[in-house]
């Protein structure tokens, strides 16, 4: 069909639908010219409206003609634009609706599954607040009508991209159901497996905690599981780490996680889901030495009860006594946590039951935040001069001695720069200060800074550690040090 003749009434209907300025494409030749022009045009924020309007015309023509070759050409071009110009089609709600409409077309040619795949990729890789809003308000309400056409193509790559769609939409039930359907219909997919689809399938089984189900189907892909592809190697390492007993090399795991954040082939939501699951399993694997009551006033500032929504199975330490020097036994407990925090919370009713059942031992429960911790610390601490981090001779050298003598005490209680974030260290410091006092903590950290600064090229060699220690000192000052005290310059 080279030319499409539209009546005046049809043109008016299109203008009513897409706006009075809408100019429908009238032939295949015109369609190709507009695509070429679009491909060669530099896209940025200044001409975004023109870009969206042009795509609107092209998608409308495909919907009117149901030409699968044109659909494949356009979706491929739009992909190239998205990748190279970092410009997302999902920022326009009308374009999102039109992309959904393409999946409702039963294209006659075998290119159908490739068109659907391109459409899902354009929808799934939505970035920014506006794109996510359009996906949530448009695609969420249409995906149930689109899912049948997509899955019935029985193409593994396309079905995995549909998993991605459900992940973007946070439709957890549908995500699990689709994964189950893929496993049941595996005989239709097994010949389509390659390194890319294999890697994605492994990670989706990991996200969903259904590794065992997929293991039955991947035994025959021994060469793929031994692939040099980095994503597959990471999956193997993660699987081995959590299946074995004993110590987890958390520092190495975090380094690998940071590297994973930078690889291509995954959307931000996929990376976030995989990393969240890894961190969740780290929590489940390690022995938790203390828990908190799950109460609204016992949460960090800015958090709500609804934020503590990650249900995990933890290994909780039961100590011999309140001195907490020796672990008597380890029990498994269902707990809750914030997906991106390390705090572990237990429902107060369950906590009461656990304490009763383990009355012969001691379970460490963090004090409620409603207690006036700042007041307690100020009463406990006598006046003292805040330590300097400058490398100078002190009158009696007490500052340096304090830093050296108490260094092991902080490290023993979990305070260190390597492998920790500022938020994690602050949580540790808030536990340490009430126990050993603000003076000891401050002098220890200041002593560490002076020791590094005093070495040859120390300011340069240890610049990161020094800046982090001085950040922690500044935060301690703002939180606990009395206002009338003199705060030294660093």
Image (tube, rainbow, N blue to C red):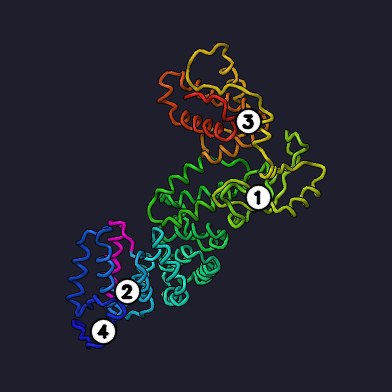
Q: Mark 1 — residue? A: 297
- Measured Cα–Cα span from mark 3 to mark 2: 62 Å
Sequence-wise first label, 1 or 2: 2
Question: Residue 81: x and y, percent?
Answer: 28, 61
Q: Is 74 contained in the magenta span?
A: yes
Sequence-wise first label, 3 or 1: 1
- Measured Cα–Cα span from mark 3 to mark 1: 29 Å
Tell me the mark number nearer the camera, choosing from 4 and 2: 4
Residue 220 visible (yes or no): yes
Q: Mark 4 — residue? A: 12
Q: Mark 2 — residue? A: 111
Which span is picked out in magenta? 68-88
**Residue 429 appears left or right of 451:** right
Is residue 322 placed above or below 274 in the rendered structure? above
Sequence-wise first label, 4 or 3: 4
Is residue 17 placed above or below 277 in the rendered structure? below
């Amino acid at each position: 069909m080279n030319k499409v003749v539209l009546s005046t009434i049809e043109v008016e209907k299109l203008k009513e639908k897409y706006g009075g300025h809408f100019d429908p494409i009238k032939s295949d030749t015109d369609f190709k010219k507009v695509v070429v022009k679009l491909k060669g045009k530099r896209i940025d924020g200044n001409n975004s409206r023109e870009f969206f309007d042009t795509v609107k015309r092209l998608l409308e023509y495909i919907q009117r003609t149901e030409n699968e070759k044109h659909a494949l050409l356009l979706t491929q071009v739009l992909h190239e634009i998205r990748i190279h110009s970092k410009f997302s089609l999902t920022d326009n709600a009308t374009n999102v609706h039109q992309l959904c409409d393409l999946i409702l077309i039963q294209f006659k040619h075998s290119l159908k599954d490739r068109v659907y795949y391109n459409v899902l990729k354009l929808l799934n890789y939505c970035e920014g607040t506006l794109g996510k809003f359009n996906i949530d308000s448009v695609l969420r309400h249409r995906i149930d009508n689109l899912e049948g056409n997509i899955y019935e193509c029985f193409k593994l790559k396309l079905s995995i991209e549909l998993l991605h769609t459900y992940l973007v939409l946070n439709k957890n039930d549908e995500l699990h159901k689709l994964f189950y359907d893929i496993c049941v219909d595996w005989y239709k997919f097994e010949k389509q497996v390659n390194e890319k689809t294999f890697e994605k399938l492994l990670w989706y089984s990991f996200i969903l905690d259904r590794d065992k189900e997929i293991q039955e189907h991947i035994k025959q892909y021994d060469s793929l599981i031994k692939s040099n592809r980095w994503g597959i190697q990471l999956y193997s390492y993660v699987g081995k780490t959590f299946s074995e007993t004993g110590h987890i090399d958390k520092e190495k795991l975090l380094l690998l996680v940071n590297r994973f954040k930078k690889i291509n082939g995954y959307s931000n939501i996929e990376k976030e889901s995989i990393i969240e699951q890894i961190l969740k399993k780290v929590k489940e694997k390690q022995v938790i030495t203390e828990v908190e009551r799950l109460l609204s006033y016992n949460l960090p500032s800015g958090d709500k009860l609804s934020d503590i929504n990650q249900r995990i199975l933890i290994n909780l330490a039961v100590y011999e006594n309140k001195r907490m020097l020796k672990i008597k036994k380890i029990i498994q407990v269902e707990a809750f946590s914030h997906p991106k925090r390390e705090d572990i919370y237990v429902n107060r009713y369950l906590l009461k039951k656990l304490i009763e059942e383990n009355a012969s031992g001691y379970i460490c429960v963090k004090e409620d935040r409603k207690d006036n911790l700042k007041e307690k610390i100020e009463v406990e601490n006598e006046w003292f001069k805040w330590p300097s981090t400058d490398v100078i001779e002190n009158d009696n050298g007490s500052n340096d001695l304090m830093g050296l003598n108490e260094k092991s005490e902080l490290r023993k209680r979990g305070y260190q720069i390597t492998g920790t974030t500022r938020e994690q260290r602050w949580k540790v410091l808030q536990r340490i200060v009430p126990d050993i006092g603000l003076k000891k903590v401050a002098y220890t950290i200041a002593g560490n800074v002076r020791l590094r600064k005093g070495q040859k090229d120390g300011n340069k060699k240890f610049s990161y550690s020094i800046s982090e220690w001085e950040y922690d000192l500044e935060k301690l000052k703002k939180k606990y040090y009395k206002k009338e005290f003199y705060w030294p310059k660093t």
